Image (cartoon, rainbow, N blue to C red):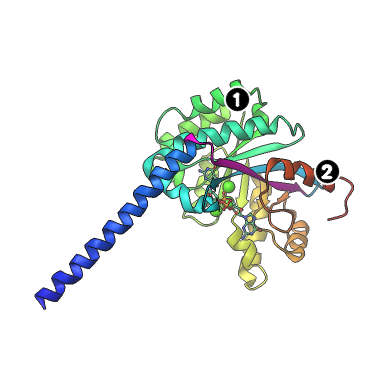
Amino acid sequence: AKQAGRATYKIFEAQMDVELQARKALEYDLRQAVLKNELEVHYQPLIDLEARAVAAVEALVRWRHPTRGLVSPAEFIPLAEETGLIVAIGEWVLETACLQALEWPQLRVAVNLSPVQFRGRELVETVDGVLVRTGLDPARLELEITESVLINDATAALEILNGLKSLGVRIAMDDFGTGYSSLGYLNSFPFDKIKIDRSFIGDMSSKDKSGAIVKSVISLGQSLNMVTTAEGVETIEQATFLTNEGCDQLQGFYFSKPVTASELTAFIDRWEGSDIM
Ligand code: C2E
Ligand code: CA
Ligand code: CA
Ligand code: CA
């Protein structure tokens, strides 16, 4: 039995080796990707229901891998966060999105920030630097953060968020409803927007409770004077429900997937004068 145990352990060890090697290879590839300009930013429109127009775009990073094709951020952001590469990638996405936004003067641009970017003290300076270099009006930049940013060191997070606010940018709470004490966070941190997590939107037709939760988050946002955005809107039924409940903005495949900058420009052109809504 001891022998068998040892053998199993050997196999386990060998497997760990393979995994570690695969990880190392991916990490090497990702470092190269940054150097070789293989990262791309795609944009997904946010539809303002009152104006019935595209109000903003969310910048979402992708990796155009030479052999693996377009790699989703879900596959490399975690590694980028573990290795710290997310700091460089995050700044690159921010600068790229701000430059791109100059071509869409009527739109806001939303950029995701990783909790790792909140660890150092330099985030406020980084964002300020990008705004100065690109010349983008700070009021047109929205930074999306998740609750996990606030959990570790709430005092430090608040200081950074206040620093960002003082630059004139807007702050959105992303994936709202998926964490722990979201309500307290809404009270203590300077959020301009709540993005209702797409899990609630997706469940609305099958679970009555999800519809009820979405309704109450919308009215919560209204009473706190925050913009409410619903993510992951895929059907006309969802869009109608959210419109009737007074949600401010909708985002999801029903309108458009994240697309390249030129595709987004074409989407806006098509939208104007169309009767999609
Ligand atoms: P997220 O910030 O919650 O972004 C929204 C995700 O939902 C995007 O996935 C988008 O493609 C997807 N989505 C939008 N509408 C629909 C819909 O109607 N149905 C469904 N099923 N999905 C929809 P994506 O682009 O794969 O990004 C995944 C996550 O990766 C993002 O979630 C965000 O957490 C992270 N991410 C993406 N780009 C960046 C970045 O530049 N920096 C950081 N730190 N994270 C990023
Ligand atoms: Ca987001
Ligand atoms: Ca989200
Ligand atoms: Ca998410």
Quote the CA–CA distance across marks 2 and 1.
27 Å
Q: Which residues are magenta?
A: 35-48
Residue 252 screen position, x and y as percent = 68, 55
Q: Secondary structure at mark 2?
A: helix
Quarter of the picture containing the N terminus is bottom left
Which of label 2 and label 1 is nearer to you? 2
Return the residue found at the far left: 2
Note whether 50 is above or below 123 in the view shown.
Answer: below
Q: Is residue 250 visible?
A: yes
Residue 95: image quadrant is top right
Q: Toward the viewer: 244 or 115? A: 115
Earlier residue among tags 2 and 1: 1
Describe residue 1's horizontal placement relative to residue 180 as left or right.
left
Amino acid type at image mark 1: Leu
Q: Main secondary structure of the magenta part?
A: strand
Residue drawn at the location 73% of the way across and 59% of the way down: 254
Furthest residue to the right?
A: 273
Kindly identify the residue that appears in the image at 19 percent across and 65 percent down. Answer: 10
